[in-house]
Each structure stands twice: as C-alpha cells, then as structure tokens.
Amino acid sequence: MNTKMRLLIPALLMWAGSACAQSSVTMYGLIDEGLNFTNNAGHGSAYQIKSGDVVGSRWGLKGVEDLGAGNKAVFGLEGGFDASTGQLGQGQRLFGRQAYAGLASETYGTLTLGRQYDPTVDFFSALTAAGNWEGDLGATPFDNDNSDWDFRVNNSVKYVSPTIAGLTGEAMYGFSNTAGGFAENRLYSVAGQYQNGGLTAALAYMKIDNPGAGTSGAVTNDAVFSGSSQQNIDAAVGYKWNKFFLAFDYSHTQIDAPTANAFLTGTIQPQGGTWSSWKFDNFQLNGQYYFQPDLWIGAAYAYTLGKLDSTAGDYSPRWHQVSLMLDYDLSARTSLYLQGAYQHVQGAHTGTEFDNAQLLASPAASSSPNQMVYRVAMIHRF
C-alpha cells in the first residue's frame, strides 16, 4: 500500500464516523439587569438594581450526540445567577435551573432524568404573561401557579412525546429519594398541547406531596408553598396573528394544611387559629402587539379569587393586577424594555400579610392593599 493510500484510509474512516455520529455542545446565556422603583415596600418607597425580572440571568451548556436511525443522546446544564452581586441563584446551586441527561427519538419521543421543569411550565406557562414575555410583573399572587418558573423538580424522570397532528404530551415523576418515605415530597405532572397554525392550547395537572419538606425530595428549598400537599390545574389558549398575540389563561392552585409561603415573611397565621387550606383561582388575559419586528408592547390583566380556610374562620380575598411592557431590540442579542404593574387586594381582612398587595418584583409587601412597581432594564443574550 503506497503512502497516499495509508493517509487516505484513516481520513475516510474519520469522516464516516463523524457523519454517522455528529455531536455538538453549545454554550449560551443571557443577562437581564435593570432599575426598579416600588412605591410602597413596607412603609416607604424602594429603589433597586435588580437582576432577572423578565427572564432569569443564566448561563448554560446543551449538547446532542447523533446515535443514528433518528436517535440522539442529549444533555443540558443551566445555572442561574444574580448579575447585581454575582451570586449563584436557585439556592446557590451551580446548575440550579436545569441539569439533565437523556435520550431522544424522532419516533418514540424524549426521556430525560435530572433537575428539570415540569410539564405545567413547558406548556401552560408559555401562554401566560409571566412565562411568555413579562416575567415577575405578570405573575399571579405569590406565583401560586408557578407560571413564573419559581421552582424546578429534582430527581425527576420526564417524557415528551413526538408531535402527532399538532398534539404533544408530557409526563413527569419527581422522586422523594427518602428511604422509607416514597410519597414524602414527591411530584407527578402531566400536560398536553395542541398547535395548529396560529392556535396554541394547553391543559396541565401537577400534584406535590409535602412540598418544601426535607432536603432530598422533588421540591425542596425553592418551593413556593409548604404544606401537606399542593395541586395545580391549568388551562390556556392563545392565537398569534401577523402582528398580534392574544391569550386567555386559567389556573387553580390548592395547598392543604399550609405552613409557609416563600413571599410572606411577616405575620402568616390567622389570629387564634391555623390555616386548613389555601385556594387560588386565577384568570388572565394577556397580549402583545408588534409595531415592527424590533418594537412591541404587551399588556395583561389578571383577576385572582382566593379562598383561605382556617380554624378561626374563612376568608375570600381578591386580587386585581394590571401590567404593561414596552420592548425595543437594539440588535438580535440586545433589548431595552420598560415595565409597570399595579396590584390591588380586596376583602382579605385576615390580619396577616395576605391583606397587603405584593407584586412578585417588589422587595417586600406593601403596607396597604395597593402596590406599584416600575422597571427599566436591558437584556443581553450570548
């Protein structure tokens, strides 16, 4: 065999191997940083430099290896951080937003294991103001339906079906990882999505047993609620025209025997009693209008009906929330935006922080039933 042939054969083998098993790893991220003003944060106004109100500041790695015959190995590692201080987010986790690996098939769907978003976030949240375009200022009170992505699921197995005739399904189980406590802080969730042209519709369900309990379960130190159980039922429909998007969302959240809420830091128990359950029914209309591809405005109105039952009495607070956002893209990677939101609480009278307005982007609850937050910021993607 001559010298040229000896050099050509290894080169051809290397080319054939790369053609059959193409792989790639992509690094990506974004920084959302700006200035917030809150008119009433306790007993006075507040000015803040704040990170991640529309989208959480993050960096990540994602990869795929082609295994042939329409099959792939996939992974994702994504960490959140506070651009104002440089600190890690999501309870100081290195990859607190996502950390998973799995297999994907064009025929059979995708199966992944690790720390992941649950199906309600993937399908329902994408049609809400908080999960689609507005972030914290569009979230429901206390982000009770998790449409603003406040928690992820540890120890989870997740399956995403292939899309057939516009229909896609998801299912997840988050293990408790507790010896002798299979149901202690576990999660299960299912969701379905239908897409046809500009129409998107979603249904989702999630149940958590003992959210916030322990340190090894499905939802631990980033839980929004702690109690004996949490149940979420979600439905949404949206339609995208050439320059206009409009969506209507409904979500129902129930927490049994609640003991804590991540956003209530003061008086939480009713005087002379303890809570039996918290229920929230959220109705939201949100939309965007594109003046041109790089300039759009968004608006949302949300109404939340609460039913707070306790051993000392029952209460029915109501929350009204209006929000606006104006976004201008300086380039494909850099955007400037302006936001404002107003929340009003009616008929609470619980003697706790439930009586006071508290937008998710604010540093503290208001000292009254009203609160306003304004934000001017930029997002840079890389």
Image (tube, helix red, strand yellow):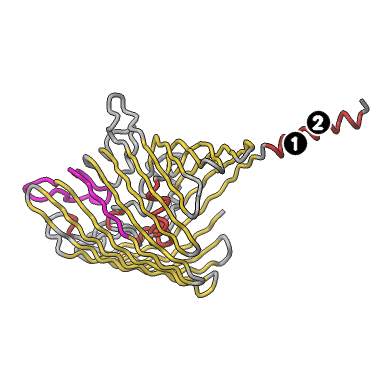
Q: Which mark is residue 120?
A: none
In the rendered view, tell whether residue 48 sits above or below residue 219.
Answer: below
List the residue tagged with mark 2: 10
Residue at 76% over, 37% down: 15
Percent from the top left, x then y, of residue 44? Answer: 25, 63
Name the magenta segment's main secondary structure: loop
Mark with earlier residue (1, 2): 2
Percent from the top left, x then y, of residue 328? Answer: 51, 69
Return the residue nearer the eye: 92 or 61.
Answer: 61
Amino acid at circle 2: Pro
Q: Quadrant of residue 6?
A: top right
Q: Is residue 238 visible?
A: yes
Amino acid at circle 1: Ala
* Position of residue 3 in the picture relative to residue 320 (left or right): right
In the rendered view, tell whether residue 311 sits above or below residue 54.
Answer: above
Look at the numbered disc 2 and give the secondary structure of its residue. helix
Percent from the top left, x then y, of residue 353? Answer: 18, 55
Q: Quadrant of residue 238?
A: bottom left
Return the residue nearer the eye: 106 or 152.
Answer: 106
In the rendered view, tell whether residue 283 sits above or below residue 148.
Answer: below
Farthest right residue?
2
Q: Is residue 326 visible?
A: no
Determine if the magenta segment contains residue 352. no
In the rendered structure, are the residues bearing label 1 and label 2 in contact, judged by CB atoms less than 8 Å apart? no
Percent from the top left, x then y, of residue 18? Answer: 71, 37
What is the span of residues highlighted in magenta in the rendered image?
Answer: 250-275
Residue at 48% over, 62% down: 378
* Position of residue 280 in the picture relative to residue 299 (left or right): left
List the residue tagged with mark 1: 16
Q: CA distance from mark 1 to mark 2?
A: 10 Å
